[in-house]
Image (spheres, helix red, strand yellow):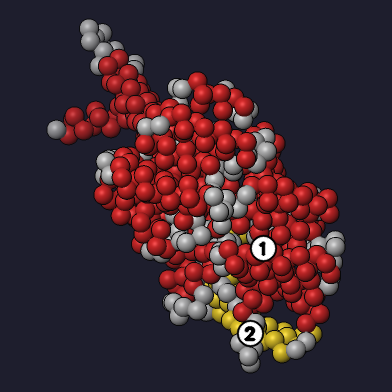
Amino acid sequence: MQSSLKTFFSNLRKKRIIEILAAFIGGGWLLLEFVHWLLVDHYHFPEKMIDITFITVLGTLLCTLIWRWFSGQEKSRKFKLELVLIPLVILVAVLLDISLLLHLKGPESEAIPTTKWKNSIAVLPFVDMSPQKDQEYFCDGMTEELINRLSNIKELKVPARTSAFMFKGKAEDIREIGRKLNVRIVLEGSIRKMGNQLRVTAQLVNIADGFHLWSETYDRELMDVFDTWDEIALTIADKLKFTLLAKEKAKVTKRYTENIEPYNLYLKGRWYWNKWTEADIRKAMDCFQAAIDIDPNYALAYAGLAEAYNTLSHYSIVRPEEIYPKAKELALKALSLDKTLAEAHTVLGYVLVYYDWDWESGEREFKAAIALKPDDVTAHHLYSYFLVIMNRYEEAFSEIRKALAVDPLNMITNRTLGDFYYHSGQYDRAIESLKKTIEMEPAFSYAHSYLGLAYLQKSMYLEAIEEIQKDLELQRALRPLFLAYLGVAQFKGGFVEKGKDILNGLLAQSQKEYVPPYFFSYLYFAMGDKDQGFSYLNKAYQKRDAWLPLLTFDHFFDAVRSDPRFEDILRRMNFPK
């Protein structure tokens, strides 16, 4: 026994097995660290790259050890075991790596990114401490202002407005907030505004232990508010040990107006806009226009007004010619004043895609917006829908996940992820995802109807009808859309008379007000009347219906995609072949 062990250890020394093992352990560890810290953490490669690297290194080590162990043997051998073991190890390693790579390519298999940044901060809504409690819009605007300013620091993760505002008015534990937003530090504070006097209190809190890293109170004149936000943003950068380059500092302290009056109106406009109802969006439009009237060079107000026009189409049934040309005009005006305004590029891209059907230019504008403001949730969200229109699903999933990484609690982007599963034919995943969204906010519009559409594709007609009816009860402004969805569900479920009742009701409504022709094509195709279905699609084409770009992925048209009339509409819309 001792002789065998002695021979074994002698062979280890002779064949330098221990040295090889040590070299691989050291070199492999360095390689894994390189992949982890540079490729995954810094350049945000998928985390499975670490697994792929580990399997490759381990396979190479085993092959090397096998080769060294059997090499140099003096006795001739009829059967060389290493010639079987080495190819076997290579085959297993390659198969495992291929399996991991295939999972990398499938966007539906990847989790929403939860990248851990070295520095991350959430800006919580500032509390209104004014005597009359009438400065909520100002406090919310100031919070959003700081989020936007801090987002310009390249190496700092700042969750977007929507996620931060989920905690407004809630006495939630600071550690729980940090966990949900995946941040290390929280900025919180209050504002007391009386006439032209302003008191701002701000403090940085460490999530890990709840200790205050910094706090300050600023007593200023209202006209000095711009200097106050500059000072707070730069102080935070200093406390987090950032050395800002000149361009980065210029972005953090950039001002679009020096006049407090239009700035105040802009903040009020954003406050109304974020309420997401037709009435409030129209109030926001009035505020943005009033800001422009005072300062005709206020680029941000033009962009805000352009965005309000675009948003109106999501909360009200309006004629395309009444909103999109005006939105385009305003976006171009904003860009003529400041070509670096990401919001204006996003609005312009939207109009170019949904109204002009200029696919190439629209994509260019979305990309320009993202290049200027990489954490712009709206830009990533709208660009992802463009990619679905182009049937580029892998890229679309990537974009919507980028939006979710910045704004994880955003209801719209969470709902859109489920919508993309639906459109890409992953109905079970769509149902699972949309149910999670509904759990977050049961009254959120579109979520129930999208869930209903997923049920519809699985021939679960009663469940589909029930979910769509919930959206009809929740969202009055988009009633024609949800009625069209419900009518399709009734026809497909065999409830033909109920489907006809909905169709007749919408036809009667269209005699009094605008109803997108696209909705009628849904119903006629579901009823089996292809001629009328294509007739309404042609009407939608003539009206430049903003819903028409959805033709490329809308499942309601799956049965007629091979019809020459369908292909003709796509050709006239200049869709890429």
Q: Image quarter for residue 231? A: bottom right
**Classed neighbour count for the residue bearing mark 1: other residues with Cα under 10 Å, few (<14), some (14–19), many (≥20):** some
Q: Residue at x 31, y 26 (%)?
A: 92
Residue at left offset 67%, top offset 67%: 284
Q: Amino acid at mark 2?
A: Asp
Do labels 1 and 2 touch, CB within 8 Å? Answer: no
* Quarter location, residue 448: bottom left
Asked if residue 460 is positioned above or below residue 338 in the image, the reply reads above
Compared to 257, does 526 lie above or below? above
Q: 71 or 520: nearer the eye?
A: 520
Residue drawn at the location 50% of the way across and 52% of the way down = 509
Residue 267 position, x and y percent, is 69, 71
Q: Is residue 467 left or right of residue 157?
A: left
Q: Is residue 122 visible?
A: no
What residue did someone put label 1 on?
Answer: 148
Question: Pointer 2: what residue?
Answer: 134
Can residue 197 be seen by looking at this rendering?
yes
Q: Position of residue 335 (x, y in %)?
A: 79, 50
Instruction: Please state which amino acid type lies under the numbered disc 1.
Output: Asn
Question: Of marks 1 and 2, which one's residue comes earlier in the chain?
Answer: 2
Mark 1 vs mark 2: in front: 2
Q: Residue 495 at what x, y percent from top left?
A: 28, 44
Question: In the image shown, does 482 or 105 lie closer to the viewer?
Answer: 482
Quarter of the image that includes the N terminus: top left
Density class for disc 2 (Cα within 10 Å; few <14, some 14-19, many ≥20) is: few
Q: Quadrant of residue 233?
A: bottom right
Relative to the observer, which residue lies in front, 130 or 100?
Answer: 130
Q: Residue furthest bottom?
A: 131
On the rendered structure, is 152 left or right of 182? Answer: right
